[in-house]
Image: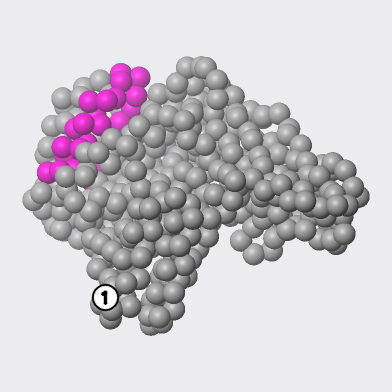
Amino acid sequence: MKVGLQWAFSDAHLPTSQSNSQRQLSVSVSAEGEGSQAPLNLCFVLDRSGSMAGTPLKTVKDAAHKIIDRLTERDRISIIAFDHKAEVLVKNQLATDLAGIKRRIDGLRSGGGTSIDAGLKLGIAELAKEKDDYVSQLLLLTDGENEHGDNARAVKLADVATGYNLTVSTLGFGDHWNQDVLEQIADAGGGSLSYIQHAEEAIATFGRLFTRMQSVSLTNAFLNVELADGTRLADLKPVAQVAPETVELPIVQEGNQAMIRLGDLMKDQPRVILLNLYIPQLAAGAATVGKLQVTYDDPAIGLTGQTSESVPIEIAAMDDYSPKEDAGVQQNILALAKYRQTQIAEDKLKAGDRQGAVTMLQSAANTAIQMGDQNAATVLQENATQLQAGKELSEGDRKKTRIVSKTQLQ
């Protein structure tokens, strides 16, 4: 297995007459080629608090059963149950006694409050016991607020998990979970945020997430960017991921070197990173303005710290400038704009600026239309219309807005 690395500028040409030119650089990174697939080391962290009583808990049990049936004897499974405290329901073990694991799941009973960080801490500890040569994935499901826990601690735990090469994804069930907290946990943990609005969606959502986990071939990936003299990253929010979901990414910079954590690399779904660059005045002709390289682990063959080939980033400076725009990069720019416009709308609504929120939601809807993302456009415009009519957005409306801002609905 190797790294597939491709890049493109928003405009591959720049004028020689300008002292400084801004360009967006889109970088697509995925796993490519043939090779054995590493087994999965999966941990479910399941909310069993009182609010999960009845249909929600039964539905989660059924969905978990479906995933258990898809595990192979090479895979590992662990399960944590939490309310206001957490316990190991199934210790980290090979997925051989599926009937016994299902019986433990069936024994779950609801009751108590909710402490997300208690469940997350125990899940990370259990998952980390057997992480070498595995693709390690934690899936946290909750339907409520973290009233017995500490939200900042939960986000910090997800960040710590990535240091152990563990990936944390979150699932919000129903309408009463905190989308800010679950998004922050998923972003910090290098995973995804999903929403189960109705119980009948649970099995399909679990299945989609499991398929994504199975497609992970390389892990612990970092994109290393070396910029030529005079070329620099923008000062404010210079890097974001735009696929498979939109995430504002932290970056470590030292001089003209920058390092961006990518995490898992999948075979069928590239990670697409958008960098905002400023390029100095150049003489006419082709110029190399930087280099890209990826470091990664290949758990299937037990190799760590692998390095891809270094790829030069080139742009053409022209005396008689004519633009050469890339349609794919323009789509990526729109995806990031949709996310940021929606975030601004949410901030304005929280601050009591209803009209400002309406304006930004309409802008985000128009951006979605430009992208061809009709599902997002419909959700965003309907919310704008409700606010303009003096109505309040439901919790379901707010959560669906957050999901469509980050990705395209399937």
Q: Residue at x 30, y 18 (%)?
A: 73
Is 64 included in the stretch rendered in magenta? yes
Number of disc labels: 1
Q: Which residue is mark 1?
A: 392
- Residue 391 figure quarter: bottom left
Q: Residue at x 54, y 29 (%)?
A: 31
Q: Residue at x 57, y 54 (%)?
A: 333
Where 184 sits versus 315, above or below?
below
Residue lying at the far left of the rendered structure: 54
The one nearer the camera, 138 or 256, is 256
Q: Position of residue 147 (x, y in %)?
A: 27, 65
The amino acid marked with disc number 1 is Glu
- Residue 277 figure quarter: bottom right
Q: Secondary structure at mark 1?
A: loop
In the rendered image, the quadrant that contains the C terminus is top left
Can see residue 252? no
Can see residue 228? yes
Span shown in magenta: 58-84
Is 311 included in the stretch rendered in magenta? no
The one nearer the camera, 82 or 183, is 183
Q: Position of residue 28 (x, y in %)?
A: 59, 39
**Residue 34 located left or right of residue 81:** right
In the rendered image, the quadrant that contains the N terminus is top right
Q: How is the image coloured?
A: one colour
**Residue 312 located left or right of residue 336:** right
Q: Residues within 10 Å of mark 1 (few under 14, many from 20)?
A: few
**Residue 282 located left or right of residue 174:** right
Where 228 sits versus 112, above or below?
above
Q: Residue at x 27, y 25 (%)?
A: 70
Q: Position of residue 384 (x, y in %)?
A: 35, 71
